[in-house]
Image (cartoon, rainbow, N blue to C red):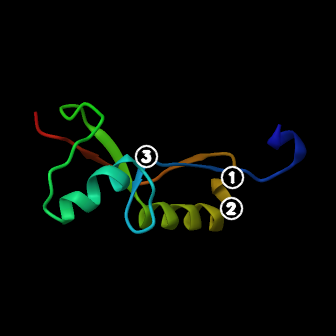
Amino acid sequence: MAAASGAKVTEVRAARFYGPGAVSVLTLLVQRQVLEGRLILVPQELDVPHSHSSIGDTARTLIGASRDGQAYGHARHVPTTALYGES
């Protein structure tokens, strides 16, 4: 639909966010407690990897894609880190 309208579109794909200002399970339920040395309870499987993207990496990827005329019509992936819990 966007291509038919002539709109220049690109897609930037990211995982769950972490970092200043991010809102995710990690930032809401884990990050502050870890930094304060407190016990954390997480409503997810801890022995399964979960991917996270930093807010800064996401912003840089969005800016880079917006400045690259060859990005239109293509997907870009934000650098992502797989974090594991302990079982």
Q: Nearer the viewer, residue 21 or 6?
A: 21
Callout 2: 10 Å neighbours few (<14), some, many (20+)? few
Residue at left offset 81%, top offset 42%: 3
In the image, residue 13 lies at what x, y percent? 52, 47
Q: Quadrant of the C terminus?
A: top left
Residue at left offset 42%, top offset 47%: 16
Q: Which residue is mark 2?
A: 69
Q: Amino acid at mark 3?
A: Ala
Marks 1 and 2: in contact by CB < 8 Å? Answer: yes
Task: Work out how far the residue at label 2 is from the one at label 1, CA to CA, in angstroms.
Answer: 6 Å
Q: Is residue 32 above or below residue 30?
A: below
In the image, residue 81 lies at what x, y percent? 30, 50
Q: Earlier in the sequence, mark 3 or mark 2?
A: 3
Residue at left offset 47%, top offset 49%: 14
Q: Amino acid at mark 1?
A: Tyr
In the image, residue 76 lies at what x, y percent? 53, 50
Q: Which residue is mark 1?
A: 72
Q: Nearer the viewer, residue 46 or 78?
A: 46
Q: Is residue 44 visible?
A: yes
Does residue 44 appear left or right of residue 25 in this picture?
Answer: left
Observer-side mark, 3 or 2, equals 3
Task: Work out how far the residue at label 3 is from the one at label 2, CA to CA, in angstroms.
Answer: 24 Å
**Kind of element beneath mark 3:** loop
**Kind of element beneath mark 1:** loop
Q: Nearer the viewer, residue 24 or 79?
A: 24
Q: Which residue is mark 3?
A: 15
